[in-house]
Amino acid sequence: MSRVLSSKVSTTPFEGQKPGTSGLRKKVTEFQKPHYTENFVQSTLSALGDKIDGCTLVVGGDGRFFTKEAVAIIIKMAAANGVKRLIVGQHGVLSTPAVSCLIRKHQTMGGIILTASHNPGGPDGDFGIKFNCANGGPAPEAVTSEIYQISTKISSYSIADISCDIDAIGSSSYSVDGRLFIVDVVDSVDDYVHLMRQIFDFDAIRQLLTGSDGNEPLRIRVDCLNGVTGPYARRVFCEELGAPADAVVHSQPLADFGGLHPDPNLTYAKPLVEAVKQGGQGFGAAFDGDGDRNMIIGEGAFFVNPSDSLAVLANNLDCIPYFRRLGVRGLARSMPTGCALDRVAAAKKLECFEVPTGWKFFGNLMDAGRLSLCGEESFGTGSDHVREKDGIWAALAWLSVIAQRQQSVQQILEAHWDQYGRNFFTRYDYENCESAPCEKMMSELNQLVADPSTVGKTFSSGGKSYTVSKADNFCYTDPVDNSVTKNQGIRLIFSDGSRVVFRLSGTGSSGATVRMYVESYEKDNTRMDAQAALAPLVDIAITVSKLKEYTGRNEPTVIT
Ligand code: VG1
Ligand code: CO
């Protein structure tokens, strides 16, 4: 066992080490600045207070550029700060839901996830660091603001001269300042796959994919966009469930994602859409860089809107053994997410929660036993099996529904709309705009919703009229700990239940990204083209916000 002593290095604070919607995200070049990463890691470890002494933490990330360097820094600093044991994914690789799984399985004090999720990677791309707590979920605001506060005053960090091979599975022990310190490098996939086997009926899905029940096999195409999910998807879909090897593509995690933008939506996952259109597969799925997002498409690339996906799964949870066993305790969605879920909750007499954007807001409800399934319009779906959204889980959930109902993706959606009506939903993203004018737009919108005369106003476009019945800036009171989170998005809610929502993104690394969410409910006309159904309200939203003037953009970067 090698013996080392830790040392203290003086440093000065960096501005802006403030975690956003999901951790600290900055350009790689920022994290590469001397002391930058160390400062943030020290702030994170210090925020644990006395709990750090002798604790265990999980460490891993999506394999993007700078992951290995960051893991090396975390090992040295965890050792010097009194951590007893680190569980590290081999090569530093763990998907975000796999980290959550490991934290819960080994009951650790938490974990550090190295990812900028769907943001592009590589030397000129983004990097990110996020802390998850002992429940396996992203740190709540109280913890992230503590981390930020510490980062503004930091004057030194502790570090030990340890180097550890994270490419080989196995355990290494060190004596640091006379204390035992252990690094366990574990297989990135094993524990996660074990969990999936307990949740789903793998036999039933294997029958579906191989045709061993005498039916035509369901051909699938899974696109990992060169993110972290490759090894997970190959193991689950090919090795465990019998899909042919070529069903999983872009399955080698690459430091720069091979130039792809690992954001599973119709713009950045277009190759999947084209391949399924041409290849005739009955099911397609794509995941983001760190494996917590999913996009589902059916035959002919029939697109499942994430808000609908959540509602359909909620309506069919009895197709999944986990929920048959444990029951369903409640449902939730983030505020901008379409309200299709609420209709299912009402029909099934389940509690339904509306929380701010970001997975950290679901954790308390799950820990309190009030929430089983939740999701976000941003291609996030998950359950209380872990405390993160989970892309592979979502694909398996959909395959479970298909296997049980013996219907196509499109048939399942259409049956859902026939039963509940359809919440048409779209999101417009204006990425990387200039910050100042976008802030100005938001403050004008703030004034608009604060003005009492806004309620009752009628806006018209394309032969349709909408009257404002409620206008506000969304404020959330957590029902479990009563913490209050303000300014979570401008809402205009109209008398027929249609909605327009505006937010600034909290995951970008530079500039401002404006998100505009538009939703409109139709009881009967459920087969309309979504863009056509929403066109009048989109027009109203753009006009009211003066979005084109403020962003200087005629068209959004991405439409979902
Ligand atoms: C976006 C999404 C939000 C999601 C977050 C993290 O946040 O809108 O729903 O939880 O990304 O997802 P924002 O603040 O940019 O709108 V991930 O997969 O990037 O960890
Ligand atoms: Co992600």
Image: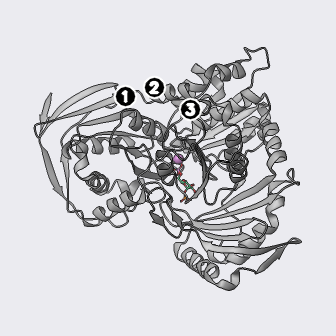
Front position in the image: 474 or 265: 474
- The residue labelled by disc 2 is 190
Q: How is the image coloured?
A: one colour
Label 1 Cα neighbours within 10 Å, binned few <14 / some 14-19 / many ≥20? many
Q: Position of residue 229 (x, y in %)?
A: 53, 35
In whole angstroms, how far apart are the C-alphas of marks 2 and 3?
A: 17 Å
Front position in the image: 204 or 300: 204
Q: Is residue 472 above or below residue 93?
A: below
Task: Tell whether label 1 touches label 3 (CB within 8 Å).
Answer: no
Q: Nearer the viewer, mark 2 or mark 3?
A: 2
Q: Is mark 2 within 8 Å of ligand 2?
A: no
Amino acid beneath label 2? Asp
Residue at disc 1, secondary structure: strand
Residue at disc 2, secondary structure: helix
Label 3 Cα neighbours within 10 Å, binned few <14 / some 14-19 / many ≥20? some
- The residue labelled by disc 3 is 251
In primary-sequence order, the first of circles 2 and 3 is 2
Task: Tell whether label 2 touches label 1 (CB within 8 Å).
Answer: yes
Res. 416 visible in picture: yes
The residue located at (72%, 63%) in the rendering is: 518
- The residue labelled by disc 1 is 186
Q: Position of residue 65 (x, y in %)?
A: 43, 44
Front position in the image: 248 or 187: 187
Q: Nearer the viewer, mark 3 or mark 1?
A: 1
Front position in the image: 266 or 313: 313
In whole angstroms, how far apart are the C-alphas of marks 3 and 1?
A: 20 Å
